[in-house]
Structures are given as structure tokens and as C-alpha cells.
Image (tube, rainbow, N blue to C red):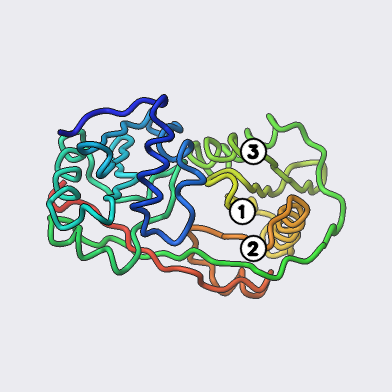
Amino acid sequence: MIRDVSASELSNVRELLGRANDAPYDLEKVAEEKCFGAGFEGQPRIRVFGNFEGIAVTCGEYLRILAVDRTHRRRGIGTALLRDAESLGTTIIAAEPGNYFTPGVSENLARFFEKRGYAETARTNNLLVDNLVDDSGPPLSGQPRAAVLHFIEKNFGAIWRFEAERAATIFSIEEAGEIAAFSTHEANNRGLGSFGPTGVAIPYRGRGIGGRLVRASLADLRRLGYHRVVIPWTYATEYYRRTCGARIDHRFVILRRKNA
């Protein structure tokens, strides 16, 4: 009744996600990346219930996706897929480093997991920028991509490097001949207009460098045809409000299995 799914069945997966997605973003559009793309913990496992009535995607201890066809709900399919995911090692709902669709579950869905043995561990936000200006700003660094990735791993860790490696574009800024900061876009959820990750090395903070990079990435996303940009998984709401006029788009709850 629950079985593995291969990449050759992507069209069926997309159709199911169209019938099942309750997240605030277009999951069909990023179905291949979210269902078959690797995460920091390795390759995902895609499991489908029955004749594509529900789906769960796991990677390591993370449940990346759980979705049930709206016409087949309240029949225990979601619970069965969740228990199957737990048998594969799932302990955390969404919030998967490196390849997340959303950084948690929407507040209205948290109760489903709480009733099945999960507890809230944190809350976070996705922000939205819908006033993209064409701001080229001062020139950015011409450092090789490999050097910027090394900077990211050294200053922000291996998970951010993993995520940045998949980005369509990486910008960086130098100070005194050294890389001081970076920004990326179209790293996660490619095709939806997503910004980040971004970071400024500690010695260079407070100089406005981060804001320059934010605006450079947003201008490039505008050039690529986006009219709205999502800044995911952040607590820095006031910073982004001041920097680019971002506002809270959605709030998410991160949950972990009790006693796990």
C-alpha cells in the first residue's frame, strides 16, 4: 500500500502535488527538486500511498514533504505515511537543512503533528519583497566561485556551502583584498524567486555590506523576471524591512518527535 517512487514517475508525483498541496507556494513547480533532489544528509526517499493518493518525502531524520490528495483525506493516509516515515528515521518535520520547501509547517497544520507525538521547538518566518528596484550599486567582487564557497564554509558552515553550491548566482564583496560577505539566490526552490543564504563575516559587520548584497541579488532576480521574492527561514524581520521593504509573508512551526 505504501511503496517507493522512482524519478520516472515524476509526472504522477506532480499531478498528486497539484491535488494535495496546502503550502503557500507552488510545490508542483519545484516537484523534481523537492522530491528527488539531494539534501545535506544524502538522497531522499519518496514514498507514495496507494494509487498516488498521498506522498511523503524524507531525507535523513527530516520529513521534507507530507501531502494527501484532498479527495482522499480523513481516511488515515497522512497518519500512515507519517508512521512509515518514522520507520525510516524521521524525527523532525520540515526544516531540512540544504533542501527545504518550507522551513516548518504552517501554523494551521501544526496540530496534526502535535496530536501524533510531535512538539513545537521553534517558529520562523518567510518574508516577501514585492517592490523590486533596479539597484546595481557599487561593483561586486570577481572572486572565483570556488573561493567564495570556501569562504562560506569557513565562516558559516558546511550546510550553507551545500546550499550555496546549488545557487544559480553567488555574489560577494571584498574588503582589503579579502572576501567579506556573500549572497545567493535561486539556491532553494529554484523557479519560485527565492533569496539566500547570505552572510557577512564577523569583522565586517555593521558597514552596510549585507544590505548592498541583498539589493544586488534582488535586482538580479528582477532582471530574471521575478516581481516578488521570498526571503525564507529568517528571524531578521526588522533588518529586511529596513533594507528592502520586506514583510512577513507566512509563519511556520518547526516540530520534533517527542523523546526522539
**Neighbour tally class for label 2: few under 14, some 14-19, many 20 plus, Cα within 10 Å:** some
CA gap, disc 1 and disc 2: 7 Å
Q: Secondary structure at mark 1?
A: loop
Residue to which mark 3 is pinned: 151
CA gap, disc 3 and disc 2: 29 Å
Give the x, y percent position of residue 42: 39, 28
- Say which amino acid is labelled 3: Phe
Give the x, y percent position of residue 25: 48, 57
Work out whether residue 38 or residue 207 is closer to the camera in this orientation and state it: 38
Residue at x 68%, y 37% (from the top left corner): 148
Give the x, y percent position of residue 94: 34, 50
- Say which amino acid is labelled 1: Gly
Work out whether residue 19 or residue 140 is closer to the camera in this orientation and state it: 19
User: In this rendering, is residue 95 above or below 43?
Assistant: below
Mark 1 or 3, closer to the camera: 1
Residue to which mark 2 is pinned: 228
Determine which of the numbered discs, if any, sits on residue 193 in the image.
1
